Image: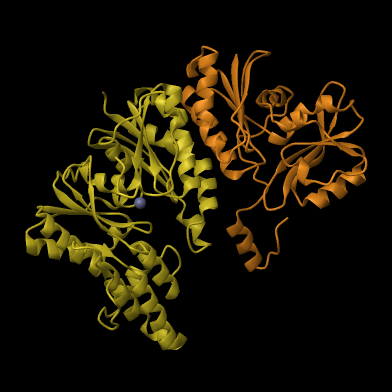
Protein backbone atom coordinates (compact mmCIF):
# COMPACT_ATOMS: atom_id res chain seq x y z
CA UNK A 1 0.00 0.00 0.00
CA UNK A 2 1.35 3.38 -1.00
CA UNK A 3 1.02 6.27 1.35
CA UNK A 4 0.12 9.38 -0.66
CA UNK A 5 -3.30 10.50 0.52
CA UNK A 6 -5.61 13.16 -0.92
CA UNK A 7 -7.94 14.29 1.85
CA UNK A 8 -11.10 16.39 1.64
CA UNK A 9 -12.79 18.16 4.57
CA UNK A 10 -16.11 20.03 4.39
CA UNK A 11 -17.72 19.42 7.79
CA UNK A 12 -18.33 23.05 8.74
CA UNK A 13 -17.32 26.36 7.16
CA UNK A 14 -13.90 25.55 5.71
CA UNK A 15 -13.54 23.90 2.31
CA UNK A 16 -10.25 22.04 2.57
CA UNK A 17 -8.09 19.60 0.63
CA UNK A 18 -4.59 18.33 1.33
CA UNK A 19 -2.02 15.93 -0.01
CA UNK A 20 -0.01 14.09 2.62
CA UNK A 21 2.77 11.57 2.08
CA UNK A 22 3.47 9.52 5.16
CA UNK A 23 3.94 12.11 7.93
CA UNK A 24 4.88 14.88 5.49
CA UNK A 25 2.39 17.52 4.39
CA UNK A 26 2.82 18.18 0.66
CA UNK A 27 -0.03 20.69 0.53
CA UNK A 28 -2.75 21.92 2.87
CA UNK A 29 -5.30 24.20 1.19
CA UNK A 30 -8.16 25.82 3.11
CA UNK A 31 -10.79 28.11 1.58
CA UNK A 32 -12.38 29.76 4.59
CA UNK A 33 -15.96 30.95 4.45
CA UNK A 34 -15.69 32.95 7.69
CA UNK A 35 -16.29 36.27 5.91
CA UNK A 36 -19.36 34.83 4.22
CA UNK A 37 -20.94 33.87 7.53
CA UNK A 38 -19.94 36.95 9.54
CA UNK A 39 -22.99 38.90 8.27
CA UNK A 40 -25.22 36.27 9.91
CA UNK A 41 -23.30 36.21 13.20
CA UNK A 42 -22.61 32.50 12.90
CA UNK A 43 -22.31 29.60 10.48
CA UNK A 44 -25.43 29.13 8.36
CA UNK A 45 -25.60 25.47 7.26
CA UNK A 46 -27.30 26.12 3.90
CA UNK A 47 -24.88 28.92 3.04
CA UNK A 48 -21.95 26.69 3.99
CA UNK A 49 -23.19 23.80 1.84
CA UNK A 50 -23.75 26.07 -1.16
CA UNK A 51 -20.26 27.47 -0.88
CA UNK A 52 -18.58 24.07 -0.46
CA UNK A 53 -20.10 22.97 -3.77
CA UNK A 54 -18.80 25.95 -5.72
CA UNK A 55 -15.32 25.67 -4.18
CA UNK A 56 -14.41 22.05 -3.53
CA UNK A 57 -13.14 21.02 -6.98
CA UNK A 58 -10.90 24.08 -7.29
CA UNK A 59 -9.54 23.49 -3.78
CA UNK A 60 -8.69 19.90 -4.72
CA UNK A 61 -6.95 21.10 -7.89
CA UNK A 62 -4.91 23.58 -5.89
CA UNK A 63 -3.92 20.98 -3.32
CA UNK A 64 -2.71 18.67 -6.12
CA UNK A 65 -0.88 21.54 -7.86
CA UNK A 66 0.88 22.72 -4.72
CA UNK A 67 1.90 19.16 -3.89
CA UNK A 68 3.17 18.69 -7.44
CA UNK A 69 1.16 15.50 -7.94
CA UNK A 70 -1.68 14.35 -10.18
CA UNK A 71 -4.79 12.43 -9.16
CA UNK A 72 -3.36 9.31 -10.80
CA UNK A 73 -0.39 9.24 -8.41
CA UNK A 74 -2.59 9.43 -5.31
CA UNK A 75 -2.81 6.11 -3.47
CA UNK A 76 -6.00 6.70 -1.47
CA UNK A 77 -8.69 9.32 -1.07
CA UNK A 78 -9.81 10.32 2.43
CA UNK A 79 -12.83 12.35 3.45
CA UNK A 80 -14.52 13.56 6.63
CA UNK A 81 -17.61 11.43 7.15
CA UNK A 82 -18.73 12.74 10.57
CA UNK A 83 -19.62 14.69 12.67
CA UNK A 84 -20.67 18.05 11.24
CA UNK A 85 -23.30 19.93 9.28
CA UNK A 86 -24.93 17.21 7.19
CA UNK A 87 -25.45 19.34 4.06
CA UNK A 88 -21.82 20.44 4.22
CA UNK A 89 -20.47 16.93 4.86
CA UNK A 90 -22.48 15.52 1.95
CA UNK A 91 -20.72 17.77 -0.58
CA UNK A 92 -17.31 16.47 0.48
CA UNK A 93 -18.45 12.87 0.73
CA UNK A 94 -20.18 12.89 -2.69
CA UNK A 95 -17.11 14.51 -4.24
CA UNK A 96 -14.62 12.14 -2.60
CA UNK A 97 -16.69 9.06 -3.47
CA UNK A 98 -16.97 10.13 -7.12
CA UNK A 99 -13.26 10.92 -7.42
CA UNK A 100 -12.21 7.64 -5.77
CA UNK A 101 -14.73 5.66 -7.81
CA UNK A 102 -13.61 7.22 -11.09
CA UNK A 103 -9.94 6.54 -10.33
CA UNK A 104 -10.45 3.02 -9.00
CA UNK A 105 -8.87 4.00 -5.65
CA UNK A 106 -9.85 3.01 -2.12
CA UNK A 107 -11.68 5.49 0.11
CA UNK A 108 -11.06 6.21 3.80
CA UNK A 109 -13.97 7.72 5.71
CA UNK A 110 -12.62 9.68 8.65
CA UNK A 111 -14.04 10.95 11.92
CA UNK A 112 -13.37 14.71 12.14
CA UNK A 113 -12.39 14.51 15.84
CA UNK A 114 -9.94 11.73 15.02
CA UNK A 115 -8.46 14.22 12.57
CA UNK A 116 -7.92 16.89 15.24
CA UNK A 117 -6.12 14.33 17.43
CA UNK A 118 -4.06 12.89 14.56
CA UNK A 119 -2.81 16.35 13.48
CA UNK A 120 0.03 15.88 16.00
CA UNK A 121 1.24 12.82 14.14
CA UNK A 122 2.26 14.98 11.21
CA UNK A 123 5.71 16.54 10.87
CA UNK A 124 7.21 18.69 12.24
CA UNK A 125 5.37 18.01 15.54
CA UNK A 126 5.47 14.23 14.97
CA UNK A 127 4.30 13.40 18.47
CA UNK A 128 4.32 9.72 19.38
CA UNK A 129 1.88 8.19 21.89
CA UNK A 130 1.06 8.03 24.67
CA UNK A 131 -0.34 11.52 25.27
CA UNK A 132 -3.56 13.29 26.18
CA UNK A 133 -5.11 15.44 23.46
CA UNK A 134 -7.34 18.43 24.09
CA UNK A 135 -9.54 19.42 21.17
CA UNK A 136 -11.43 22.67 21.62
CA UNK A 137 -13.31 24.49 18.89
CA UNK A 138 -16.66 26.02 18.06
CA UNK A 139 -18.10 22.54 17.61
CA UNK A 140 -16.30 20.33 20.10
CA UNK A 141 -14.51 20.29 23.45
CA UNK A 142 -12.96 16.96 24.24
CA UNK A 143 -10.11 15.15 25.96
CA UNK A 144 -8.76 11.96 24.41
CA UNK A 145 -6.19 9.54 25.73
CA UNK A 146 -4.06 8.59 22.76
CA UNK A 147 -2.29 5.34 23.56
CA UNK A 148 -2.44 4.46 19.88
CA UNK A 149 -3.35 6.85 17.08
CA UNK A 150 -5.73 4.23 15.70
CA UNK A 151 -7.87 4.14 18.82
CA UNK A 152 -8.09 7.32 20.91
CA UNK A 153 -10.18 6.93 24.05
CA UNK A 154 -12.50 9.74 25.12
CA UNK A 155 -11.76 10.86 28.68
CA UNK A 156 -14.10 13.83 28.87
CA UNK A 157 -16.15 16.21 26.79
CA UNK A 158 -18.47 19.16 27.01
CA UNK A 159 -21.91 18.45 28.40
CA UNK A 160 -23.44 21.51 26.74
CA UNK A 161 -21.73 24.30 24.76
CA UNK A 162 -18.34 23.85 23.13
CA UNK A 163 -15.57 26.18 24.33
CA UNK A 164 -15.42 28.02 21.01
CA UNK A 165 -19.20 28.36 20.99
CA UNK A 166 -19.04 29.93 24.46
CA UNK A 167 -16.34 32.31 23.22
CA UNK A 168 -18.44 33.32 20.20
CA UNK A 169 -21.56 33.84 22.32
CA UNK A 170 -19.65 35.86 24.91
CA UNK A 171 -18.03 37.94 22.20
CA UNK A 172 -21.45 38.72 20.75
CA UNK A 173 -22.66 39.91 24.18
CA UNK A 174 -19.69 42.27 24.25
CA UNK A 175 -20.39 43.52 20.74
CA UNK A 176 -17.45 41.79 19.07
CA UNK A 177 -18.26 40.65 15.51
CA UNK A 178 -18.27 36.96 14.51
CA UNK A 179 -16.00 35.03 14.65
CA UNK A 180 -15.38 36.39 18.11
CA UNK A 181 -12.22 34.51 19.15
CA UNK A 182 -9.50 36.88 17.94
CA UNK A 183 -11.46 39.99 18.95
CA UNK A 184 -12.17 38.69 22.44
CA UNK A 185 -8.54 37.73 22.94
CA UNK A 186 -7.32 41.16 21.82
CA UNK A 187 -9.79 42.92 24.12
CA UNK A 188 -8.94 40.59 27.02
CA UNK A 189 -5.27 41.62 26.78
CA UNK A 190 -6.28 45.13 27.89
CA UNK A 191 -8.34 43.93 30.83
CA UNK A 192 -8.08 42.55 34.36
CA UNK A 193 -8.93 38.85 34.39
CA UNK A 194 -9.69 38.90 38.10
CA UNK A 195 -12.17 41.79 37.83
CA UNK A 196 -15.18 39.50 37.54
CA UNK A 197 -15.69 36.16 39.20
CA UNK A 198 -17.30 33.98 36.55
CA UNK A 199 -18.00 30.31 37.32
CA UNK A 200 -15.39 28.01 35.86
CA UNK A 201 -16.86 25.41 33.57
CA UNK A 202 -16.10 22.17 35.32
CA UNK A 203 -18.62 19.45 35.74
CA UNK A 204 -18.01 16.04 37.21
CA UNK A 205 -19.80 13.15 35.70
CA UNK A 206 -18.62 9.85 37.03
CA UNK A 207 -15.44 9.23 39.02
CA UNK A 208 -13.09 10.58 36.33
CA UNK A 209 -14.60 14.05 36.53
CA UNK A 210 -13.06 15.22 33.29
CA UNK A 211 -16.07 16.79 31.58
CA UNK A 212 -16.74 20.42 30.71
CA UNK A 213 -19.76 22.69 30.97
CA UNK A 214 -19.99 26.19 29.55
CA UNK A 215 -23.67 27.00 29.90
CA UNK A 216 -23.16 28.54 33.37
CA UNK A 217 -20.37 30.94 32.47
CA UNK A 218 -22.25 32.17 29.42
CA UNK A 219 -25.32 32.89 31.56
CA UNK A 220 -23.15 34.59 34.20
CA UNK A 221 -21.77 36.95 31.57
CA UNK A 222 -25.28 37.69 30.35
CA UNK A 223 -26.38 38.62 33.89
CA UNK A 224 -23.21 40.68 34.48
CA UNK A 225 -23.83 42.74 31.34
CA UNK A 226 -27.47 43.25 32.36
CA UNK A 227 -26.48 44.40 35.85
CA UNK A 228 -23.85 46.79 34.49
CA UNK A 229 -26.11 48.35 31.89
CA UNK A 230 -24.86 49.75 28.58
CA UNK A 231 -22.60 52.37 30.15
CA UNK A 232 -21.19 49.95 32.68
CA UNK A 233 -20.44 47.37 29.98
CA UNK A 234 -18.69 50.03 27.90
CA UNK A 235 -16.55 51.03 30.89
CA UNK A 236 -15.64 47.44 31.83
CA UNK A 237 -15.57 45.77 28.41
CA UNK A 238 -11.92 44.73 28.59
CA UNK A 239 -12.26 43.43 32.17
CA UNK A 240 -15.36 41.46 31.20
CA UNK A 241 -13.54 39.98 28.20
CA UNK A 242 -10.46 39.07 30.26
CA UNK A 243 -12.46 37.51 33.09
CA UNK A 244 -14.72 35.65 30.70
CA UNK A 245 -11.84 34.30 28.63
CA UNK A 246 -10.14 33.16 31.82
CA UNK A 247 -13.26 31.24 32.87
CA UNK A 248 -13.26 29.48 29.49
CA UNK A 249 -9.58 28.56 29.20
CA UNK A 250 -8.84 27.71 32.87
CA UNK A 251 -10.93 24.54 32.93
CA UNK A 252 -9.36 23.43 29.66
CA UNK A 253 -5.91 23.68 31.22
CA UNK A 254 -6.93 22.13 34.55
CA UNK A 255 -8.70 19.20 32.95
CA UNK A 256 -5.87 18.56 30.51
CA UNK A 257 -3.31 18.49 33.29
CA UNK A 258 -5.46 16.32 35.52
CA UNK A 259 -6.08 13.90 32.65
CA UNK A 260 -2.35 13.67 31.93
CA UNK A 261 -1.70 12.97 35.60
CA UNK A 262 -4.37 10.28 35.86
CA UNK A 263 -3.26 8.63 32.61
CA UNK A 264 0.43 8.94 33.54
CA UNK A 265 1.47 10.15 30.09
CA UNK A 266 4.61 12.21 29.32
CA UNK A 267 2.97 14.60 26.86
CA UNK A 268 -0.14 16.62 26.05
CA UNK A 269 -1.37 18.21 22.83
CA UNK A 270 -3.92 20.82 21.89
CA UNK A 271 -5.94 21.26 18.71
CA UNK A 272 -9.10 22.86 17.38
CA UNK A 273 -9.74 26.54 16.68
CA UNK A 274 -9.55 27.51 20.36
CA UNK A 275 -5.97 26.20 20.42
CA UNK A 276 -5.08 29.41 18.59
CA UNK A 277 -5.92 31.36 21.77
CA UNK A 278 -2.71 32.84 23.16
CA UNK A 279 -3.84 32.81 26.79
CA UNK A 280 -4.67 29.09 26.53
CA UNK A 281 -1.29 28.33 24.95
CA UNK A 282 0.58 30.29 27.63
CA UNK A 283 -1.27 28.66 30.52
CA UNK A 284 -0.74 25.18 29.12
CA UNK A 285 2.97 25.77 28.52
CA UNK A 286 3.48 26.99 32.08
CA UNK A 287 1.40 24.22 33.64
CA UNK A 288 3.09 21.52 31.56
CA UNK A 289 6.57 22.79 32.29
CA UNK A 290 5.89 22.65 36.02
CA UNK A 291 4.92 19.00 35.63
CA UNK A 292 7.69 18.04 33.24
CA UNK A 293 5.25 17.32 30.41
CA UNK A 294 6.02 17.80 26.73
CA UNK A 295 3.49 20.10 25.04
CA UNK A 296 2.68 19.59 21.38
CA UNK A 297 0.98 22.55 19.77
CA UNK A 298 0.74 22.16 16.01
CA UNK A 299 0.87 25.19 13.76
CA UNK A 300 -2.35 27.22 13.73
CA UNK A 301 -3.16 25.92 10.24
CA UNK A 302 -3.27 22.39 11.65
CA UNK A 303 -5.33 23.37 14.71
CA UNK A 304 -8.23 24.96 12.86
CA UNK A 305 -10.22 22.72 10.51
CA UNK A 306 -8.05 21.44 7.66
CA UNK A 307 -7.67 18.39 5.45
CA UNK A 308 -4.08 17.44 6.34
CA UNK A 309 -5.35 16.25 9.72
CA UNK A 310 -7.96 14.15 7.90
CA UNK A 311 -5.18 12.55 5.86
CA UNK A 312 -3.32 11.88 9.11
CA UNK A 313 -6.33 10.17 10.67
CA UNK A 314 -6.82 8.23 7.44
CA UNK A 315 -3.43 6.65 8.06
CA UNK A 316 -4.99 5.01 11.14
CA UNK A 317 -8.42 4.19 9.70
CA UNK A 318 -9.30 1.16 7.58
CA UNK A 319 -9.74 2.03 3.92
CA UNK A 320 -12.90 0.83 2.20
CA UNK A 321 -11.83 -0.97 -0.96
CA UNK A 322 -13.06 0.08 -4.41
CA UNK A 323 -15.98 -0.13 -5.17
CA UNK A 324 -17.45 -1.15 -1.78
CA UNK A 325 -17.66 2.49 -0.64
CA UNK A 326 -20.20 3.58 -3.26
CA UNK A 327 -23.06 3.19 -0.76
CA UNK A 328 -21.28 4.96 2.12
CA UNK A 329 -22.91 8.06 3.56
CA UNK A 330 -22.15 11.15 5.65
CA UNK A 331 -23.37 11.20 9.27
CA UNK A 332 -24.16 14.38 11.21
CA UNK A 333 -23.48 13.08 14.71
CA UNK A 334 -20.44 11.75 16.53
CA UNK A 335 -20.64 8.10 17.50
CA UNK A 336 -21.81 7.58 21.11
CA UNK A 337 -18.51 6.03 22.20
CA UNK A 338 -16.29 8.78 20.82
CA UNK A 339 -14.24 8.20 17.71
CA UNK A 340 -15.28 5.81 14.96
CA UNK A 341 -11.95 4.70 13.56
CA UNK B 1 -19.23 8.28 -26.86
CA UNK B 2 -20.80 7.03 -23.61
CA UNK B 3 -22.74 9.56 -21.56
CA UNK B 4 -23.79 9.10 -17.95
CA UNK B 5 -26.72 11.25 -16.84
CA UNK B 6 -28.08 11.74 -13.33
CA UNK B 7 -30.72 13.88 -11.65
CA UNK B 8 -31.09 13.90 -7.86
CA UNK B 9 -33.20 17.06 -7.56
CA UNK B 10 -36.38 15.13 -6.71
CA UNK B 11 -37.11 12.35 -4.20
CA UNK B 12 -37.11 9.86 -7.11
CA UNK B 13 -33.58 10.31 -8.50
CA UNK B 14 -32.98 9.19 -12.08
CA UNK B 15 -29.95 7.84 -13.94
CA UNK B 16 -29.25 6.90 -17.53
CA UNK B 17 -26.45 5.50 -19.60
CA UNK B 18 -26.47 6.49 -23.25
CA UNK B 19 -24.05 5.36 -25.98
CA UNK B 20 -24.34 7.61 -29.02
CA UNK B 21 -28.06 7.65 -29.74
CA UNK B 22 -28.79 4.41 -27.95
CA UNK B 23 -30.14 4.46 -24.40
CA UNK B 24 -28.31 1.56 -22.75
CA UNK B 25 -30.13 1.87 -19.44
CA UNK B 26 -32.58 4.12 -17.66
CA UNK B 27 -32.99 3.73 -13.89
CA UNK B 28 -34.59 5.26 -10.83
CA UNK B 29 -33.56 5.06 -7.19
CA UNK B 30 -37.09 4.90 -5.86
CA UNK B 31 -39.16 7.47 -4.03
CA UNK B 32 -37.63 7.81 -0.59
CA UNK B 33 -36.25 10.71 1.44
CA UNK B 34 -32.53 11.08 0.93
CA UNK B 35 -32.40 8.48 -1.83
CA UNK B 36 -30.05 10.76 -3.77
CA UNK B 37 -27.32 9.77 -1.32
CA UNK B 38 -27.28 6.35 -3.00
CA UNK B 39 -26.78 7.72 -6.50
CA UNK B 40 -23.17 6.57 -6.90
CA UNK B 41 -24.11 3.06 -5.81
CA UNK B 42 -26.85 3.03 -8.46
CA UNK B 43 -24.41 4.40 -11.03
CA UNK B 44 -22.00 1.59 -10.23
CA UNK B 45 -24.74 -1.02 -10.73
CA UNK B 46 -25.75 0.60 -13.99
CA UNK B 47 -22.18 0.53 -15.30
CA UNK B 48 -21.66 -3.02 -14.10
CA UNK B 49 -24.81 -4.19 -15.92
CA UNK B 50 -23.53 -2.53 -19.08
CA UNK B 51 -20.12 -4.16 -18.52
CA UNK B 52 -18.50 -0.73 -18.40
CA UNK B 53 -15.94 0.82 -16.08
CA UNK B 54 -15.92 4.48 -14.96
CA UNK B 55 -13.00 5.12 -17.31
CA UNK B 56 -15.24 4.18 -20.26
CA UNK B 57 -17.39 7.27 -19.72
CA UNK B 58 -16.79 10.14 -22.09
CA UNK B 59 -19.22 12.73 -20.68
CA UNK B 60 -21.50 13.41 -17.70
CA UNK B 61 -24.80 15.31 -17.80
CA UNK B 62 -26.36 16.37 -14.50
CA UNK B 63 -29.74 17.84 -13.59
CA UNK B 64 -29.11 21.19 -11.88
CA UNK B 65 -32.63 21.55 -10.47
CA UNK B 66 -34.75 23.17 -9.34
CA UNK B 67 -35.62 20.76 -6.53
CA UNK B 68 -34.29 19.70 -3.14
CA UNK B 69 -31.15 21.69 -2.29
CA UNK B 70 -29.23 18.80 -0.76
CA UNK B 71 -30.23 16.44 -3.55
CA UNK B 72 -29.12 18.87 -6.25
CA UNK B 73 -25.77 19.31 -4.52
CA UNK B 74 -25.15 15.56 -4.26
CA UNK B 75 -25.89 15.15 -7.96
CA UNK B 76 -23.63 18.02 -9.00
CA UNK B 77 -20.83 17.05 -6.59
CA UNK B 78 -20.95 13.50 -7.95
CA UNK B 79 -20.93 14.68 -11.57
CA UNK B 80 -18.09 17.16 -11.00
CA UNK B 81 -16.06 14.58 -9.04
CA UNK B 82 -16.37 12.10 -11.92
CA UNK B 83 -15.54 14.82 -14.44
CA UNK B 84 -12.53 16.03 -12.46
CA UNK B 85 -11.06 12.56 -11.97
CA UNK B 86 -11.80 11.24 -15.47
CA UNK B 87 -10.97 14.56 -17.16
CA UNK B 88 -14.21 14.47 -19.14
CA UNK B 89 -16.74 17.25 -19.76
CA UNK B 90 -19.69 17.79 -17.41
CA UNK B 91 -22.81 19.55 -18.66
CA UNK B 92 -25.76 20.86 -16.71
CA UNK B 93 -29.38 20.49 -17.80
CA UNK B 94 -32.61 21.81 -16.33
CA UNK B 95 -34.57 19.29 -14.28
CA UNK B 96 -37.80 21.04 -15.33
CA UNK B 97 -36.85 20.92 -19.02
CA UNK B 98 -36.05 17.22 -18.73
CA UNK B 99 -39.51 16.69 -17.23
CA UNK B 100 -41.07 18.72 -20.04
CA UNK B 101 -39.13 16.75 -22.65
CA UNK B 102 -40.78 13.62 -21.29
CA UNK B 103 -44.22 15.24 -21.67
CA UNK B 104 -43.82 16.07 -25.37
CA UNK B 105 -45.97 13.10 -26.36
CA UNK B 106 -48.71 14.10 -23.90
CA UNK B 107 -50.23 16.65 -26.30
CA UNK B 108 -50.17 17.56 -29.98
CA UNK B 109 -47.53 20.19 -30.85
CA UNK B 110 -48.82 23.69 -30.31
CA UNK B 111 -52.01 22.49 -28.68
CA UNK B 112 -51.18 23.04 -25.05
CA UNK B 113 -48.38 24.34 -22.85
CA UNK B 114 -46.24 21.74 -21.07
CA UNK B 115 -46.04 22.55 -17.37
CA UNK B 116 -43.51 20.48 -15.37
CA UNK B 117 -44.01 20.92 -11.62
CA UNK B 118 -41.70 19.88 -8.78
CA UNK B 119 -42.71 19.85 -5.11
CA UNK B 120 -40.71 22.66 -3.47
CA UNK B 121 -41.99 21.91 0.09
CA UNK B 122 -43.42 24.64 2.33
CA UNK B 123 -46.56 24.68 0.18
CA UNK B 124 -44.67 25.88 -2.85
CA UNK B 125 -43.82 24.33 -6.20
CA UNK B 126 -41.04 24.91 -8.71
CA UNK B 127 -42.56 25.19 -12.17
CA UNK B 128 -42.08 26.49 -15.69
CA UNK B 129 -44.13 26.35 -18.91
CA UNK B 130 -42.96 25.40 -22.39
CA UNK B 131 -44.50 25.36 -25.85
CA UNK B 132 -43.55 22.19 -27.73
CA UNK B 133 -42.63 22.47 -31.42
CA UNK B 134 -43.42 19.85 -34.05
CA UNK B 135 -39.74 18.85 -34.04
CA UNK B 136 -39.87 18.17 -30.29
CA UNK B 137 -38.19 21.46 -29.39
CA UNK B 138 -39.20 23.40 -26.28
CA UNK B 139 -39.76 27.15 -26.09
CA UNK B 140 -39.85 28.64 -22.60
CA UNK B 141 -43.09 30.56 -21.98
CA UNK B 142 -42.92 30.86 -18.19
CA UNK B 143 -39.39 30.75 -16.78
CA UNK B 144 -38.55 28.46 -13.85
CA UNK B 145 -39.48 29.87 -10.47
CA UNK B 146 -40.97 29.04 -7.07
CA UNK B 147 -44.76 29.42 -7.00
CA UNK B 148 -47.61 29.39 -4.58
CA UNK B 149 -49.72 26.58 -6.14
CA UNK B 150 -52.89 28.70 -6.49
CA UNK B 151 -50.92 31.56 -8.06
CA UNK B 152 -49.46 29.14 -10.59
CA UNK B 153 -52.93 27.79 -11.33
CA UNK B 154 -54.21 31.33 -11.96
CA UNK B 155 -51.26 32.14 -14.22
CA UNK B 156 -51.88 28.97 -16.22
CA UNK B 157 -55.61 29.69 -16.51
CA UNK B 158 -54.68 32.99 -18.13
CA UNK B 159 -52.17 31.32 -20.47
CA UNK B 160 -54.60 28.84 -22.05
CA UNK B 161 -54.62 25.05 -22.50
CA UNK B 162 -51.93 23.25 -20.56
CA UNK B 163 -50.72 19.84 -19.41
CA UNK B 164 -49.42 19.36 -15.87
CA UNK B 165 -46.92 16.73 -14.74
CA UNK B 166 -44.27 16.11 -12.12
CA UNK B 167 -44.16 15.19 -8.44
CA UNK B 168 -45.64 18.59 -7.55
CA UNK B 169 -48.47 18.49 -10.10
CA UNK B 170 -51.03 17.17 -7.61
CA UNK B 171 -50.44 20.20 -5.37
CA UNK B 172 -51.64 22.59 -8.09
CA UNK B 173 -55.37 23.07 -8.78
CA UNK B 174 -55.87 22.04 -12.44
CA UNK B 175 -57.03 25.14 -14.38
CA UNK B 176 -60.23 24.93 -16.51
CA UNK B 177 -58.39 24.41 -19.79
CA UNK B 178 -55.75 22.22 -18.27
CA UNK B 179 -55.34 18.52 -17.70
CA UNK B 180 -53.14 16.24 -15.72
CA UNK B 181 -50.67 14.11 -17.71
CA UNK B 182 -50.50 10.38 -17.00
CA UNK B 183 -48.49 9.40 -13.94
CA UNK B 184 -45.78 8.01 -16.21
CA UNK B 185 -44.83 11.57 -17.15
CA UNK B 186 -44.20 12.49 -13.47
CA UNK B 187 -40.91 10.61 -13.49
CA UNK B 188 -37.81 12.34 -14.74
CA UNK B 189 -35.99 10.30 -17.39
CA UNK B 190 -32.30 11.08 -17.08
CA UNK B 191 -31.84 10.40 -20.80
CA UNK B 192 -34.00 13.48 -21.37
CA UNK B 193 -31.28 15.56 -19.66
CA UNK B 194 -28.97 14.38 -22.42
CA UNK B 195 -31.66 15.15 -25.01
CA UNK B 196 -31.82 18.71 -23.68
CA UNK B 197 -28.05 19.12 -23.98
CA UNK B 198 -28.09 17.71 -27.54
CA UNK B 199 -30.76 20.27 -28.43
CA UNK B 200 -28.58 23.12 -27.26
CA UNK B 201 -30.08 23.34 -23.78
CA UNK B 202 -26.83 22.83 -21.85
CA UNK B 203 -26.67 24.93 -18.66
CA UNK B 204 -23.73 25.84 -16.43
CA UNK B 205 -23.09 23.13 -13.83
CA UNK B 206 -24.49 25.23 -10.99
CA UNK B 207 -27.56 24.59 -8.84
CA UNK B 208 -30.82 26.30 -9.78
CA UNK B 209 -31.92 26.86 -6.19
CA UNK B 210 -34.56 29.49 -7.09
CA UNK B 211 -34.78 30.24 -3.38
CA UNK B 212 -32.39 32.00 -1.01
CA UNK B 213 -31.23 30.34 2.20
CA UNK B 214 -33.68 31.24 5.01
CA UNK B 215 -30.97 33.09 6.92
CA UNK B 216 -30.29 35.26 3.85
CA UNK B 217 -33.98 36.04 3.37
CA UNK B 218 -34.28 36.99 7.04
CA UNK B 219 -31.18 39.14 6.86
CA UNK B 220 -32.43 41.03 3.81
CA UNK B 221 -35.77 41.56 5.51
CA UNK B 222 -34.07 42.81 8.69
CA UNK B 223 -31.95 45.21 6.69
CA UNK B 224 -35.06 46.61 5.06
CA UNK B 225 -34.65 45.18 1.56
CA UNK B 226 -38.14 43.68 1.77
CA UNK B 227 -38.88 40.10 0.79
CA UNK B 228 -36.68 39.20 -2.16
CA UNK B 229 -38.47 38.12 -5.34
ZN1 LIG C 1 -13.05 20.82 13.99
| Residue A9 place in picture, x, y as percent | 40, 42
Residue A190 placement, left or right of A65: left
- Residue A109 percent coordinates (x, y): 36, 36
The quadrant of the image that shows the C terminus of chain B is bottom right
Chain the render paints yellow: A
- Residue B4, how many percent across, how many down? 59, 22
Drawn side of residue B45 relative to residue A268, left or right: right
Q: Is residue A261 above or below residue A229?
A: above
Horizontal side of A275 relative to A283 (left or right) equals right
- In the image, A337 versus A87, the foreground residue is A337
Whole-percent x and y of residue B25?
A: 62, 17
Quadrant of res A314: top left
Classify residue A122 as left or right of residue B2. Answer: left
Residue occupying image coordinates x 9% and y 61%: A289
Residue furthest to the front: A206
Q: Is residue A58 visible?
A: no
Q: Colour of chain B?
A: orange
Protein image colouring:
by chain
> On the rendered image, what quadrant is the N terminus of chain B found in?
top right
Visible residue check, residue A138: yes
The correct choice, above or below, for B214 with respect to A203 in the image is above
Q: Is residue A187 above or below residue A231?
A: above
Q: Is residue B165 above or below residue A241?
A: above
Q: Nearer the viewer, residue A193 or A222?
A: A222
Amino acid sequence: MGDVVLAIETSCDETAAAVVKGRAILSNVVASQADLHSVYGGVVPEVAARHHLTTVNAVIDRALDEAGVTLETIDRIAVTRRPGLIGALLVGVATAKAVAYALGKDLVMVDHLHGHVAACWLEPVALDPPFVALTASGGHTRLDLVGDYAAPVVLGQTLDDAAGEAIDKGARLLGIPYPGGPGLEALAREGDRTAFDFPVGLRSRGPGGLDFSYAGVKTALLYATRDLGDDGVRAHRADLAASYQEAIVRPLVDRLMRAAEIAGVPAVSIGGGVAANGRLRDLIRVAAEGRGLRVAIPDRSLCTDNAAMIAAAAHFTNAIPWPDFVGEDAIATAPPGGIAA
Amino acid sequence: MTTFALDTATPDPALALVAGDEVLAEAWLGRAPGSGRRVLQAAHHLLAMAALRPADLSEVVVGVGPGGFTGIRIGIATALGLGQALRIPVHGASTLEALAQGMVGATRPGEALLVPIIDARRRQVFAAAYAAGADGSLTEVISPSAWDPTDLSAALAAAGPCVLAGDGADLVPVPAQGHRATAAADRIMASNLIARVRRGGALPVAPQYLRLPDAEENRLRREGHGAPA
